[in-house]
Amino acid sequence: MMYKFFKELFSTTKDDVSDSKGEVDVREELRRNDSEQIQLEAKKLLLSIPYEEQFGNALGAAMRVIVFGDWFTVFGSTEDDGRHPIHLYQFGDYPKIDQYRDDFAKILKKDFAIEDRDTCLAVLAGYFTVLGLTGSTKSLEGKVGKINLLIWDISKPGVNAFAVAIASYVTTAATDVRFLSKIEALEILKQLSLYAKKHFSNWTLFSDRLLEGENHVGLNSKIGKSYLKRYSGYLKEKKGSPWNNIDWLK
């Protein structure tokens, strides 16, 4: 009798497990279909974004991605479903911009003391001074940037890459919060892009130098360094990363 009880119990358990597995399979199929649809929509949208905007935005992606938490808190760090996060290709008018505008405003104020258009231009002028790009853009003409050239010593490996990345990030974030117009931002990013292409040959080299430069400048805390390194790694690896989809030269 006891044997029969356990046999029936085991049979019931097998049925429950089978039913549960079936439910999981259905949910997984729905998730896969949703993911594929999202990818298709994202790829269609990417075709409408100018190359210059995508490339300039991608220069600051290692910092920009931290705000959104892509591939870590949103998509999961152990999976790669091929998603293309639009906000790493586009700025100023991407989907969900309203959701993140306040976050960018807080970060710009906290990390760069940027509170408005004038303070934004002053900060950018400082990075353009470091890179030797003074006078290359109309919006920065006559702007005096305050920056410590001893800390931002461009003779040290990677400092120039880090300066390019920070300047790109500030430019796109400032446009997201409407301190800069899209036209002004694209003009600034054009100069940063030309500089990057002149001094680096691909995204891998640029990202490696970026991390090297951050170590010399030392802006981040230990935790900040670990996040920057982690997200740079994701940008190198993930299928939907702009670093794996935007040609370095075009």
Image (cartoon, rainbow, N blue to C red):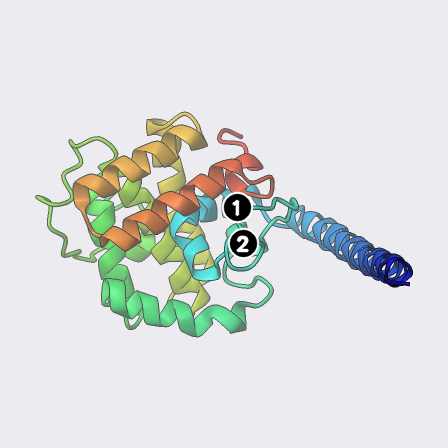
Q: Residue at x 23, y 67 (%)?
A: 113
Task: Give percent across and percent down for residue 78.
Answer: 56, 46
Q: Which residue is mark 2?
A: 90
* Earlier-in-chain disc, 2 versus 1: 1
What is the residue that sits farthest to the front in this orientation?
1
Indicate the quadrant containing the N terminus: top left, top right, bottom left or bottom right.
Answer: bottom right
Q: Does residue 42 appear to the left or right of 188 in the view shown?
A: right
Task: Give percent across and percent down for residue 220.
Answer: 23, 53
Q: Does residue 138 appear to the left or right of 239 in the view shown?
A: left
Rendered view: 245 above or below 139: above
Q: Are marks 2 and 1 in contact (CB under 8 Å)?
A: yes
- Front-lying residue, 32 or 204: 32
- Front-lying residue, 241 or 234: 234
Task: Give percent across and percent down for residue 199.
Answer: 32, 28
Under mark 2, the amino acid is Gln
Task: Give percent across and percent down for residue 177.
Answer: 42, 69
Q: How many marks?
A: 2
Which corner quadrant of the image does residue 165 belong to? top left
What is the residue that sits farthest to the left in this orientation?
150
Q: Which residue is mark 1?
A: 54
Under mark 1, the amino acid is Gln
